Image (cartoon, rainbow, N blue to C red):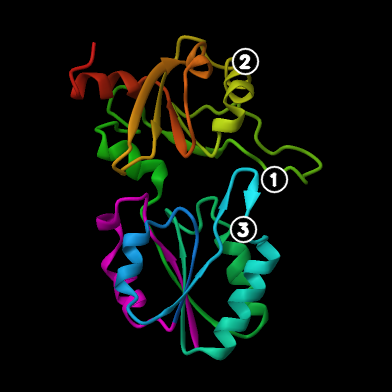
Amino acid sequence: MVVYLVGAGPGDPELITLKAVKALEKADVVIYDRLANEEILKHAKGAKLIYVGKKAGEHYKSQDEINHILVEEAKNNSVVVRLKGGDPFVFGRGGEEVLTLLDEGLEVEMIPGVTSAIGVPTTIGLPVTHRGVATSFTVVTGHEDPTKKEKQVKWDYTADTVVVLMGIGQIKENTEELMKYRDPKTPVCVIENGTGPEEKIILGNLENIAQKEINPPALLVIGNVVDVFKQINQIK
């Protein structure tokens, strides 16, 4: 019995790894979330499919329920694939699921995925680092666990580029916090539905981006690399 914890990539079904495809092809059960493009499930012919997706304000299954499903399916099947959008260890609660499985004495193998934090900007020609412009970047969640007693995100990052995931619901609050440490005119690029057919790019700055019409799922790239994106794509 083995559980493969698999990253599905940022959305485009062609951006899944070959190793992930091989795991899906031999799966008895696939437990998948909302961000995993369902075209990817075609690789798991004959497997039982269990949907456990989540989105802001609406959880089809709680994390405890997902952990329970994982354990039960792993005990009753030879090969279980837990398919998660992006990379399972980048704000995907992959670590929690691995620890649960290991506590039950179950074998786990991790297969990385292309995280949206760099995969999505790259596909539109937005480098998160660029010589002479940005030598560092940080990836941060824009939506912390509301049960925390104290917030861990302080927004005083010194990295040249900041990529914010899952932050559209709190975009006004998050950009206000960032403006305490950065110029309000710092360029911002928002990418909705990255790598998908409904992809949309919205440009602005820290001062005005929250005033624009933006719908999740989307990520924010903040920093002067946005100007490099404009050069690459000949946007004035």
Residue under label 1? 145
User: Measuring 30% from the left and 51% from the top, which residue is drawn there?
Assistant: 12
Is residue 157 on the magenta stretch?
A: no
72 and 220: which one is in front? 72
Single out the mark in the foreground, 1 or 3.
Answer: 3
Q: CA distance from mark 2 to mark 1?
A: 23 Å
In screen coordinates, is 201 left or right of 68? left
Give the number of the disc on residue 60: 3
Disc count in the image? 3
* Callout 2 amino acid: Lys
Left or right of 15? Residue 79 is right
Judging from the image, what secondary structure is the residue with disc 3 in? loop
Q: Image quadrant of residue 168?
A: top right
Q: In the picture shown, does residue 184 fall above or below 225?
A: above
* Callout 1 touching callout 3 (CB < 8 Å): no
Amino acid at pointer 1:
Asp
Q: Amino acid at mark 3?
A: Tyr
- Mark 2 or mark 3: name the one nearer the start of the chain: 3
Label 3, residues with CA under 10 Å away: few <14, some 14-19, many ≥20: some
